[in-house]
Image: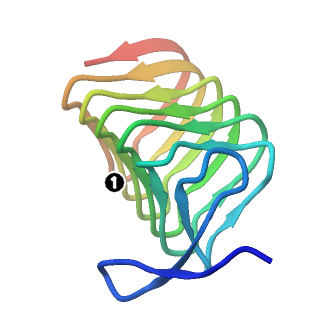
C-alpha cells in the first residue's frame, strides 16, 4: 500500500508508482502513465494510455487525457479539458474550460486554449 501525503492545499495525495509524482486520491491515473516527481495530478482528473506528466506540469479539475499526451514545463491542463492522441502542452501553456484537443497538436509558449475551443489535426499553437 502506498502512503498518503497531505499536500499544501490540504488535499490527500499518493506518489504515483511510475515516476513518483503526486496524484490526488480523488484522481485516476493508470500505471502506464508517467508522472514526474515534481508534477501533480489534482482534483478528479483522469489520465490513461502512455501519457507523460513531466517537470512541474499540473493536470487538475475534471481534465481527461488519453493516448500519448505530454504535459511539460510549467504547463497546465485543467477544468473539463479533454486531450486525446499525441498532444503536447508545454512552456507555461494552459488548456482549460471545455477545450477539446486531439491529433498531433503542440500548444506552447504561454498559449491559452480554453472555453469551448476545438483543435484537431496537425497543428502548432504558440
Q: Position of residue 85 (x, y in %)?
A: 68, 28
Q: Residue furthest left?
A: 110
Residue located 75% across and 48% down the image: 48
Scheme by which the image is coloured: rainbow
Q: Position of residue 60 (x, y in %)?
A: 45, 63
Q: Quadrant of the N terminus?
A: bottom right
Q: Is residue 91 left or right of residue 57?
A: left
Q: Is residue 18 left or right of residue 21?
A: right
Q: Position of residue 33 (x, y in %)?
A: 71, 43
52 in relation to 20, above or below? above
Residue located 32% across and 48% down the image: 114
Residue located 65% across and 78% down the image: 3
62 in relation to 51, above or below? below
Q: Nearer the viewer, residue 5 or 66?
A: 5
Q: Residue furthest bottom?
A: 10
Q: Quadrant of the C terminus?
A: top left
SS type, badge 1: loop
Task: Report the number of discs.
Answer: 1
93 in relation to 2, above or below? above
15 in relation to 8, above or below? above
Q: Nearer the viewer, residue 117 or 31?
A: 31
Q: Is residue 88 left or right of residue 90?
A: right
Q: Residues within 10 Å of mark 1 (few under 14, many from 20)?
A: some
Q: Which image quadrant for residue 111?
A: top left
Residue located 66% across and 37% down the image: 51
Q: Nearer the viewer, residue 91 or 126?
A: 91
Q: Which image quadrant for residue 50?
A: top right
Q: Which residue is mark 1?
A: 115
Amino acid at each position: 500500500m502506498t502512503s498518503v501525503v497531505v499536500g499544501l492545499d490540504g488535499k490527500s495525495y499518493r506518489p504515483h508508482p511510475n515516476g513518483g509524482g503526486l496524484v490526488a486520491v480523488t484522481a485516476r491515473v493508470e500505471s502506464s502513465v508517467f508522472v514526474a516527481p515534481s508534477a501533480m495530478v489534482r482534483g478528479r482528473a483522469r489520465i490513461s494510455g502512455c501519457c507523460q506528466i513531466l517537470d512541474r506540469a499540473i493536470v487538475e479539475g475534471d481534465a481527461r487525457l488519453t493516448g500519448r499526451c505530454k504535459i511539460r514545463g510549467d504547463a497546465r491542463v485543467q477544468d473539463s479539458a479533454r486531450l486525446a492522441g499525441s498532444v503536447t502542452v508545454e512552456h507555461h501553456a494552459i488548456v482549460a474550460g471545455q477545450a477539446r484537443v486531439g491529433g498531433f497538436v503542440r500548444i506552447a509558449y504561454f498559449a491559452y486554449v480554453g472555453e469551448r475551443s476545438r483543435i484537431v489535426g496537425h497543428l502548432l499553437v504558440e
